[in-house]
């Protein structure tokens, strides 16, 4: 099963095209299929996985491999101090 869904916000972290790294949106999901990744140092690695069309175009014209994408976590609605206070209360209750 694909780790990403169409319309999901994620982060591109490409080793092949690092200048393009940043926030993006999934446009379509393809796969699973055998994918070859060509690295700038000449290495070619073959893996089975999903491929994605995203809001950042791949200069090679290919779809992006799943390994180049990261989940984008939603920001917390709580402050750090309130989370620490909750942990302190919980730890006092557990120690009794």
Image (spheres, rainbow, N blue to C red):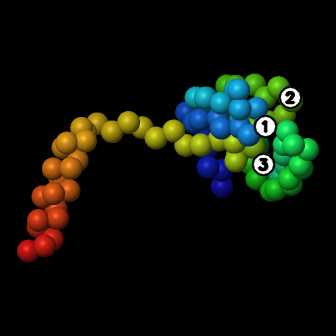
Return the residue nearer the eye: 69 or 52. 69
Q: Which residue is mark 2?
A: 61
Q: Which residue is mark 3?
A: 31
What is the spatial separation of the Cα atoms under label 3 and label 1, in whole angstroms?
21 Å
What is the spatial separation of the Cα atoms under label 1 and label 2, in whole angstroms?
13 Å
Q: Helix, strand or loop at disc 2?
A: loop
Q: Residue at x 33, y 39 (%)?
A: 76
What is the spatial separation of the Cα atoms under label 3 and label 2, in whole angstroms?
17 Å
Disc nearest the viewer among 3 and 1? 1
| Numbered tag placed on residue 16 in the rendering | 1
Disc nearest the viewer among 3 and 2? 2
Q: Position of residue 24 (x, y in %)?
A: 61, 29
Dot 3, crowdedness within 10 Å: few (<14), some or many (≥20)? Answer: few
Q: Residue at x 70, y 47 (%)?
A: 67
Q: Is residue 11 above or below residue 48?
A: above
Outermost residue, left direction? 96
Residue 91 visible to an observer of this rendering: yes
| Numbered tag placed on residue 44 in the rendering | none
Q: Position of residue 46 (x, y in %)?
A: 86, 54
Disc nearest the viewer among 1 and 2? 1
Dot 2, crowdedness within 10 Å: few (<14), some or many (≥20)? Answer: few
- Horizontally, residue 67 falls left or right of residue 88, namely right
Of pointers 3 and 2, the one earlier in the residue sequence: 3
Return the residue nearer the eye: 95 or 53. 95
Q: Helix, strand or loop at disc 1?
A: loop
Residue 26 visible to an observer of this rendering: no
């Amino acid at each position: 099963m694909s780790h990403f869904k169409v319309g999901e916000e994620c982060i591109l972290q490409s080793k092949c095209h690092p200048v393009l790294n940043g926030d993006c949106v999934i446009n379509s999901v393809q796969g699973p299929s055998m994918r070859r990744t060509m690295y700038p140092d000449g290495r070619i690695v073959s893996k089975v996985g999903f491929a994605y069309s995203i809001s950042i175009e791949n200069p090679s014209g290919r779809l992006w491999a799943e390994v180049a994408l990261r989940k984008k976590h939603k920001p917390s609605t709580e402050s750090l101090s309130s989370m620490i206070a909750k942990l302190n209360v919980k730890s006092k209750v557990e120690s009794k």
